[in-house]
Amino acid sequence: QLLCILPYEVALRRGYFAEEGLEVELVYARGGSQALQFLVGRAVDYAATSLDAALQAYQQGAPILRFCSTGRLPLFALAAAPKSPVKGLKDLEGKTVGISALGNADHVLLVYLLRKAGADPKRVQYATLGPNLYEALKAGHVEAGMVQEPALTLLKEAGGRELVNLMDLKQARAYLGGPYEFMGVAVRREERQGRLEEMRALSRALEKALRFLHAANARLIADTLPKALIAGGDEERLRAVIERYRKDLYPTGVRIDLEAARRVAESQVEAGLLPPSFRVESLLDLEVLGASG
């Protein structure tokens, strides 16, 4: 998902890491769980993942600390299939909704959305469709589904309907109560003190990248990405997606928004993935940079 990695690629390719005296290599993993396995196994020095992934790794015993944030919204929207009668969250009761997998971020978020809207998640059927979700939704095999971009745009062009777009800050405030912590950086807990100045330098570089994402035009941002990452894709559509979401998805600073992080933990508690007594502060290091909110 290119929208996840934009701040990191921008910081590297525009020289912001170098300005802070850092030599950085970006190593791509197959998802947040693998990235955190790399971190715990000492294959990398830091791991940039969603907070959802970090929470699960931490709950399973990973000795990690999360110290900065580069994303304040989840990269998901709930959309109805073409010709589906579904018009809102309450309409999903008794219907089948496509998700990537049970327990994944999109499933957890959907359950959280349903409960916030007063709908009963137990009355919804969940179809685990993995990478086939978009095609199944477009064909009407499910009534609705949790999608990302560019699938959301493509689905709307095919006659589908956007129900809730959590990549939109106004909608996130309306449906979730505010920002919902997403991408950020973790370090091995035992190395925190020895890496403290490096962590602050890394954070300063990423903050420069976030400000660039707010200030630059979408074409310049897209051109910052290495061609290998967008090979075979629709570059014009990518630029449109960046322009649509960049000021909502990315904060202008890297300090962790504690309330946004608490919403993610609350969603995992409600989905049964974390115990009711869990406190997200145990994973977060708010003293490296200070907390926002």
Image (spheres, rainbow, N blue to C red):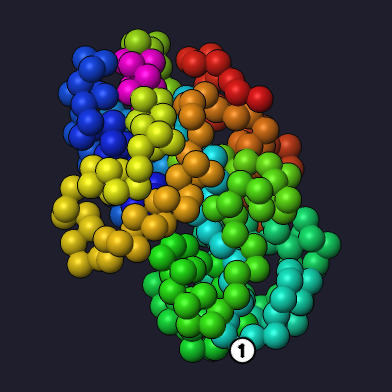
Q: Is residue 204 above or below residue 237?
A: above
User: Helix, strand or loop at disc 1?
Assistant: loop
Q: Is residue 44 above or below residue 21?
A: below
Locate residue 89 relative to residue 235 in the image: left or right.
Answer: right
Where is the C terminus found, in terms of image quarters?
top right
The residue pinned by badge 1 equals 83
Q: Can residue 144 be seen in this view?
A: no
Q: Is residue 81 visible?
A: yes
The secondary structure making up most of the magenta span is helix
Pick the front one: 252 or 37: 252
Place residue 103 in its image quadrant: bottom right
Q: Is residue 201 magenta?
A: yes
Q: Which residue is drawn at 28% across and 36% down?
A: 10
Locate residue 85 relative to residue 219 in the image: left or right.
Answer: right
Q: Is residue 44 magenta?
A: no
Q: What residue type is labelled 1?
A: Lys
Locate residue 188 relative to residue 166 in the image: left or right.
Answer: left
Q: Which residue is drawn at 40% across and 51% down?
A: 242
Pick the front one: 250 or 182: 250
Locate residue 3 relative to residue 41 in the image: left or right.
Answer: right
Coordinates of residue 162 in the picture (x, y in percent) = 60, 69
Coordinates of residue 239 in the picture (x, y in percent) = 34, 55
Count residues near mark 1 (Cα–Cα under 10 Å), then give few for <14, some for 14-19, many for 20+. Answer: few
Where is the N terminus found, in terms of image quarters?
bottom left
Q: Residue at x 39, y 47 (%)?
A: 4
Coordinates of residue 266 in the picture (x, y in percent) = 69, 44
Q: Which residue is drawn at 55% across and 67% down?
A: 146
Coordinates of residue 6 in the picture (x, y in percent) = 34, 43
Pick the front one: 279 or 99: 99
Q: In this view, does 65 lie above or below 182?
A: above
The magenta stretch is 198-206
